[in-house]
Amino acid sequence: MKIRLSTAALMMLAVAACRQRAPGVAAVRMDSTQLARFAPLPDSIAAPDNPITQAKISLGRMLFFETTLSRDHDLSCNSCHDLGQYGVDHAAVSTGAQGQHGKRNAPTVYNAAGHLAQFWDGRAPSVEEQAKGPILNPVEMAMPSDRALLLELAAMPAYRDAFHRAFPGEANPVTYDNVGRAIGAFERELVTPGRWDALLKGDSTALTPAEKQGFNDFVEVGCVSCHNGPYIGGQMYQKAGLVAPWPDRSDPGRIAVTHQAADSMVFKVPSLRNIAMTGPYFHNGGTASLAEAVRMMGRYQLGRDLTDAQVASIVTYLKALTGEIPAAYIAAPQSPRNR
């Protein structure tokens, strides 16, 4: 039995073939066993103890952009985690209250709710807990106390109403824990699916042959051992300088949290989602180039001196992990202070 394809169907197949294979470029196969170590992003990242509601999201969005959360009313969560810039400020370390600087690079908040913990040292178990930390940190937003913040928020009718809508049934919902819950609910839908997710869902043409080869090289050199799953990282801790001593050992890492000698120079493995858009890199923000970051990972984590061709190929794959910013979802609301 012969099957006749319409002209339109033939054109669609031709377009797919062009996307799959540029002139003179052979098709690239990807190991299905290795691909099975990954998964597409979820639509949102649920938490059993903080159900997502539209009222919580609305309040969380207001608070994320609210400069009242800082002592001098000049900084918001978005100052260091600029949602229009893939959730970072592109500084090695962020500038906080009165021009002070932190000691660690501010990681992106996109997709972060799915990580095993928050902060480079994992000291916060969730985005809800993480959101409360910078507000009271004297180097960051520098509010003198949670009570001082709550007095300011409760003085604004728009915030009182928003807290009551977000946490119905609570006699006094304007609490510091609820500040964290609202911001956390907002962040749990900060997801950035892209072409990589389309490929994982079955679209074999979503990546170019060069990007597919980059994935193969990513697997072959060993990056996949730490960077896998839906977030391509973010699910484990690892020592910086696993094979050779890390060049900057001024920050001892997770040992400050656990007080266990084995955690010296241990940090949370970062997600590689949007990695091409979120430099500079590593916990100290000391590496500006993504290619140099890949080269350092090869040398200090894998014990391999990667060739220029390997580095370029892996970077090509990493650039394919850039997703789409949810422009409508992150639109800055008008502050209740200005209403």
Image (cartoon, rainbow, N blue to C red):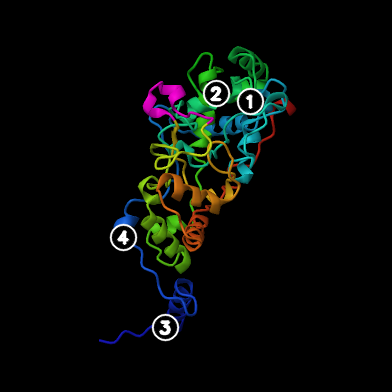
Separation of residues labelled 1 and 3 (CA atoms): 62 Å
Element carrying mark 3: loop
Element carrying mark 2: helix
Query: Which mark is drawn over residue 159?
Result: none
Q: Based on the displayed image, in which of its 4 quarters is residue 330 positioned?
A: top right
Q: Is residue 267 magenta?
A: no
Above or below, 211 against 2 in this view is above
Q: Amino acid at mark 2?
A: Gly
Query: Which mark is drawn over residue 6?
Result: 3
Which mark sits nearer the N-terminus, 3 or 4?
3
- Where does the magenta region start and end? 250-264
Kindly check if marks 1 and 2 are in contact, taking CB atoms under 8 A apart as contact. yes
Kindly check if marks 1 and 3 are in contact, taking CB atoms under 8 A apart as contact. no
Which mark sits nearer the N-terminus, 2 or 4?
4
Check disc 2 and report the residue beneath it: 133
Query: Which mark is drawn over residue 32?
Result: 4
Check disc 1 and report the residue beneath it: 140
Res 274 visible: no
Q: Amino acid at mark 4?
A: Ser
